[in-house]
């Protein structure tokens, strides 16, 4: 599901104009982003949790030149689904 589909679905379910549903989604995503930037865990019951983690730096080879390049450590988001979501995915 893509964001426009989610917006239409929420707008239909709650009898909202699509612009209001989009504003709600944008607000949720902005709050999640702010929380993750602070290092806070974002948890949705019966869905899963998002946490900020740091990907370690690593050396890689440039595919054309073969030169070794250093990729510095960078922030990333980790998602851990709840067990019920994993079971539904396996079906």
Image: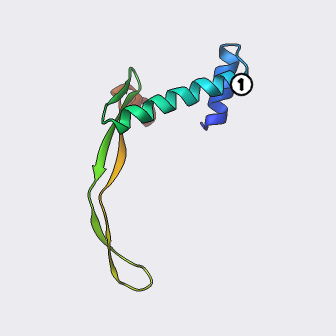
Picture residue at 69% right of the left edge, 27% below the top: 8
The picture places residue 17, in percent across and down from the top left corner, at: 73, 20
The answer to which of 90 and 72 lies nearer the viewer is 72
- The part of the image, by quadrant, that contains residue 56 is bottom left
The picture places residue 88, in percent across and down from the top left corner, at: 44, 30
Q: How many badges with numbers are in the image?
A: 1
Residue 64 seen anywhere in this rendered image of the structure = yes
The answer to which of 9 and 36 lies nearer the viewer is 36
Picture residue at 33% right of the left edge, 35% below the top: 38
- The part of the image, by quadrant, that contains residue 14 is top right
- Quadrant that contains the C terminus: top left
Query: What residue is disc 1 on?
Result: 18
Vertically, is 73 above or below 69? above
Picture residue at 41% right of the left edge, 29% below the top: 85
- The part of the image, by quadrant, that contains residue 78 is top left
The picture places residue 63, in percent across and down from the top left corner, at: 42, 79
């Amino acid at each position: 599901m893509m964001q426009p589909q989610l917006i239409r679905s929420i707008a239909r379910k709650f009898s909202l104009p699509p612009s209001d549903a989009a504003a709600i989604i944008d607000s949720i995503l902005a709050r999640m982003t702010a929380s993750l930037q602070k290092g806070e865990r974002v948890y949705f019951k019966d869905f899963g949790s998002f946490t900020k983690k740091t990907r370690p730096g690593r050396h890689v080879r440039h595919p054309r030149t073969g030169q070794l390049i250093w990729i510095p450590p960078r922030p990333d988001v980790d998602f851990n689904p709840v067990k019920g979501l994993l079971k539904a995915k396996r079906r």
